[in-house]
Image (cartoon, helix red, strand yellow):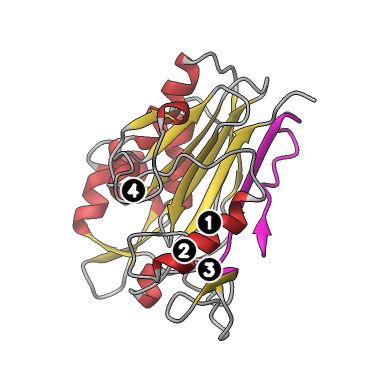
Amino acid sequence: MDILIPDWIDAPANVGAMSTTRTGGFSRAPYDDGAGGGGLNLGVHVGDDPDAVARNRAILRTLLPSEPAWLMQVHGTTVLDAADVVDASGADAPHADASIATRPGVVCVVQTADCLSALLCDINGRAVGAAHAGWRGLASGVLEQTVFRMRDAGAGEILAWLGPAIGPDSFEVGQDVFDAFADRDARMASAFRPVAGEQKYLADIYGLARAKLAGAGVTRVHGGGLCTVHDAGRFYSYRRDRITGRMASLIWLKQPA
């Protein structure tokens, strides 16, 4: 498997984190690796062969301390305690777009294929969180809610890592998306570039996320330089392919040695 490890050198040693790509699994086209090999699709809701998804999740599970707290993501702002997610392997997974954990061995997870994943931890290694941030959830405050829940659970200063997402040269949006951000905070307009001759914009989802995190007091932010649309050999992209798989970003507190 091609696994991304967050490049946050200031994260505490007891935090484990990773983000998957599309390679190294059993899924066939259009959920494959983009080169005719098996794809590591982890989404149960995208039309892939359930047996292939189960095998893919079993591969991932070998790298983790426990079964991830899978969510049914709905582009909202609900944040759960991952320890309370008991049976989340399929369609019965709870509807939420973020989770936190304060217990070692409990794994937070979000799935993406262009939307932004944000992994968070506090510098003392007391709490971690994972958030799925499409533009609706991002505008509505899913990152701020995740930070709030972590602080409420005892987190101190929080670090963030932004996983692979649709890049600023690919994320074309309409006036509704611009208004969803700029109407709440005029400073957000700087993350949008007008498309010449059209009533559309190119949106920088990474810039929007950094601004949202800064507003919540999180300024130590890493990642944010990978485009899922442009790198077809490494990432699934709904905007590019429509029918496609899902990648996962995961974070947990390690068990004491």
Q: Amino acid at mark 4?
A: Ala
Would you identify the image quadrant in which residue 255 lies? top right
Identify the element where label 4 is drawn: helix
Given contact means CB atoms under 8 Å apart, are the residues at marks 3 and 2 in contact?
no
Distance from Cα at disc 4 to Cα at disc 3: 28 Å
Distance from Cα at disc 3 to Cα at disc 2: 16 Å
Which residue is labeled 1 in the image? 57
Which residue is labeled 2 in the image? 53
Mark 3 vs mark 1: in front: 1
Give coordinates of residue 191: x percent, y percent. Answer: 40, 51
Distance from Cα at disc 4 to Cα at disc 2: 40 Å
Viewer-side residue, 236 vs 193: 236
Q: Amino acid at mark 2?
A: Val
**What residue range appears in magenta?**
1-24
Q: Amino acid at mark 3?
A: Phe
Q: Earlier in the sequence, mark 4 or mark 3?
A: 4
At 41% across and 45% down in the image, what residue appears? 132
Where 189 sits versus 48, above or below? above
Q: Residues within 10 Å of mark 4 (few under 14, many from 20)?
A: some
Mark 4 vs mark 2: in front: 2
Distance from Cα at disc 3 to Cα at disc 1: 17 Å
